[in-house]
Image: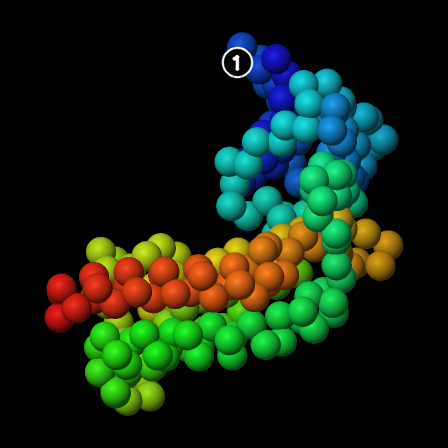
Amino acid sequence: MMIFTAKDEGVRYGGLLKSRLIPYNEIRSIHIESNQTTVTTLQGEQIVSKSGNTLSMSSDGFYKHVVENNIGYHNETEIEDGQLPVTMEEFNAMSSNTCDIAKRIGDEIVRNRLGAEYETEFLIKGGEDMKVIYFYLKMNGYLVAMSDESKVDYDESEPLSFDNILAAYLVEWDPLTRSGKYGVTVEISNEEDLISYVNDSVRNFSEDFLEER
């Protein structure tokens, strides 16, 4: 079976015995449909995989490569799966209260579990490729460093955060306007899901943090 795999250095096409690497700076567009994936090079060559919508992600930076190399990108499967793509401006509007809601829940938990001097902070970070909500603990107004063992999820790009949630991810990139459309996770689109996740995350973290203190 011939499939595409997103690597750090480019998109690899092939199977177990034979494969070909297409560097990101040689790709014009990537189009993912329910029954095939098509990669078009800058020279106009079209390479098609009929093995379904498989674009295996072996690179965490795939979306960043798409944006940095201004690759036309369209993932039809995200739309078919019920994801209504939004612009970055629409995402910013949708998420404007997200961190405030999360902080209200988080502060109540850590102050009850850890002490009145503690509070939480939630920040949405990222670029045009994706957005992530990072969770932090503060004591007397200062960020608290902690061991990796007490964290719910570790992200080396934000070593002081104790957890994170993917908030928005690229589903379309228009090379003409250099702008994207994004799928939004349920923690952004549904307040109940956000509250449930923050509640479980901060409670679990607080218990582990207490054991190490």
Q: Is residue 107 above or below residue 67?
A: below
Q: Residue at x 63, y 61 (%)?
A: 189
The residue that mark 1 highlights is 16
**Colour basis:** rainbow
Point out the image quarter for the C terminus: bottom left
- The single residue placed furthest to the top in the displayed view is 17
Residue placed most toward the observer, 128 or 27: 128
Locate residue 149, reporting x and y percent. Answer: 22, 56
Picture quarter containing residue 62? top right
Residue 208 in percent (x, y) is at 20, 61
Kindly tell me whether residue 155 is visible in this rendering: yes
Q: Is 112 on the left or on the right of 44, as rendered? A: left
Q: Residue at x 26, y 79 (%)?
A: 112
Residue type pointed to by label 1:
Leu
Quadrant housing residue 167 = bottom right
Q: Position of residue 138 (x, y in %)?
A: 32, 80
Horizontally, is 38 left or right of 213 in the view?
right
Residue visible at 44% across and 77% down in the picture: 103
Q: Nearer the viewer, residue 191 or 125?
A: 191
Q: Which x, y percent locates residue 28?
A: 79, 40
Residue 130 in view here: no
Q: Residue at x 51, y 79 (%)?
A: 100
Residue 52 drawn above or below residue 29: above
